[in-house]
Amino acid sequence: MKLAVCINHVPDTATRVNVGPDGKTIDKTGVTYVISPYDEFAIEECLRLKEKHGGEVTVISLGTDAHRESLRKALAMGVDKAVLLKDDSVRDSFAIAHALADCLKGLSPDVVFFGKQSVDYDDSAVGLMVAEMLGLPSISVVVKLEIAEGKARAEREIEGGCEIAETKLPAVFTAQKGLNEPRYPSLKGIMAAKSKPIEERPASVVQAKVETVAMRKPPAKPAGKIVGTDASAVPELVRLLHEEAKVV
Amino acid sequence: MKILIFAEQRDNKFKKPAFEAVRTARTLAGEAGGEVVALVVGSNVQSVAPALGRYGTQKVLVAEDPRLTFYSPTAYAKIVAEAAKSQKATLVVIPATAMGKDLAPRVAVKLDAGLAVDCTAIRIEGNALIATRPVYAGKALIDVKMNSQVNVLTLRPNVFSSGTSDGTAALTEKIPLALGDQDFASRVSEIKQSSGRLDIAEADIIVTGGRGLKGPENFAMIEQLAEVLGGAVGASRAVVDAGWRPHDEQVGQTGKTVSPSLYLAVAVSGAIQHLAGMSSSKYIVAINKDKDAPIFQVATYGIVGDAFEVVPALTAEIKNLLGSS
């Protein structure tokens, strides 16, 4: 089984976001970058599918040389091959999907995995756009997946429950937290990853359709008040919720 | 400008975000001198479709087929894109629900359209359509300019008003469908509801418990408080990662971003990725032993105290209030 997983290299979720000097992107000073958390579930699921069905896992990331760090970690987790689509241009989700779809066409994988969203721009769009561009079916926000005889059956999270979805392979999936517990790279894996090559290719270029014109911090919350301490403050809190906020 | 709205329904009932989308499109069309038309997709939806008229659309397209009872990414995207083309719509508005988030990227590709997801504000500046949307789980907002001839927007639920239900019922028009098996290449066959639990993404009141509760057994008091308030139970990442609560209750950057009217954070310290997911709530109550906990910086009202004393007292006091009013 040929498996492909597309990952992004993003600021750690503990990052305090400040607007950068261009007024359109974040200030990158002191920011630590990691594999987008949902992409780790995607990598893990591909590794488990490979362990079960055999085959090969290729990880792809679009971006600058900085992305090599996340690709290297994916290799250390057990991924077989890595491709860096070298790019430093400003792209919207469409332009990102276009370059990834172009690269995936050459691989013709049976399963393509993404995280359900990248935790920087939170678009949750690229995986599904790639599916559409490649003419493939998809199941997004997957929390459970079974693959057998060229077919997939998955549970995808929706409001207040799950949908059971079915598709034939090849197909695109996006991973939600809960799908699995991503492994840590073993020492052996880390050593092995050092000698695995990262193939570098140019990313295909296409005009973005959406342009960020400004970034700002959300309005600060007005200072709240400490109503009191311990259970003795409860009647006053309830009075405020009832009379002032009118939410109870 | 002509706007097509995907009016999501489940079990032949519209969800509130469908009304919000219709009303928002109506307002936008009004400003731009445009027209709005809604689209309902399902198996038996003709009878419910006219109700959309009360939120600002005079025409509703109905796409009915028994195979459309449940969501299918491939079939639904085809129907929406074809309707947008036949209506010559230049904007497609879709609720940013589980279904809408899955559908919109495919529709955008089919229409060669720009896409902005999870928008919290939309405006027209000159000839340009500008959408505002949260990024980094709400730690920042961006304004994006939509540069295509056709654009697709998804709207974050509970942000835009559906307005009051007025006006007249809409006229409906069945649209012809030519769907083959290949259009159902991926499809939902069944829905499993979580047993009667209210989802935090849809709840107007959320009571969230954090690691300070010491163990999963102590969530009983969080559940009781949520029940008295008619709200949902939320959980911090630490609690979910420890296996005390299911992931679908997680609030924050790797969970759900919520903005209910009332958010109660109990024994939650307020890590940055948690604050990102809930600080747009209208009113926030924090209950924490540690007076320096970051959660107090976003709280409207705070009580410094032991959750094990404060929460049962709060539940009793609210029960008392609701019982007497």
Image (cartoon, coloured by chain):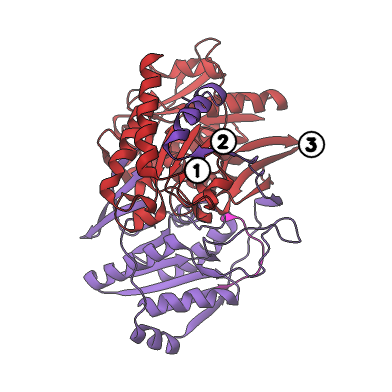
Chain colours: A purple, B red
Q: Residue furthest right?
A: B126
Same-chain check, marks 3 and 2: yes
Amino acid beneath label 1: Ala
- Can you tell which quarter of the image residue A220 is in? top right
In which chain is the residue bearing label 2? B
Query: First in sequence: mark 3 or mark 1?
Result: 1
Dots 1, 2 in contact, CB < 8 A: yes
Is B13 left or right of B161, judged from the image as shown?
A: left
Looking at the rendering, the stretch of residues picked out in magenta corresponds to A85-93
Q: Where's residue B36, x and y in %?
A: 59, 24
SS for callout 2: strand
Identify residue for label 1.
Answer: B104
Q: Which of marks 3 and 2 is nearer the N terminus?
A: 2
Q: What residue type is labelled 2?
A: Val
> What is the residue that sits farthest to the top in this orientation?
B168
Do the residues marked 3 and 1 share a common chain? yes
> Would you say A30 lies left or right of B321 here?
right
Marker disc for residue B126? 3
Q: Residue B139, percent across and down?
A: 59, 51
Which residue carries the number 2 mark?
B92
Name the residue at the front extreme: A232
Is residue B196 shown to the viewer in this render?
yes
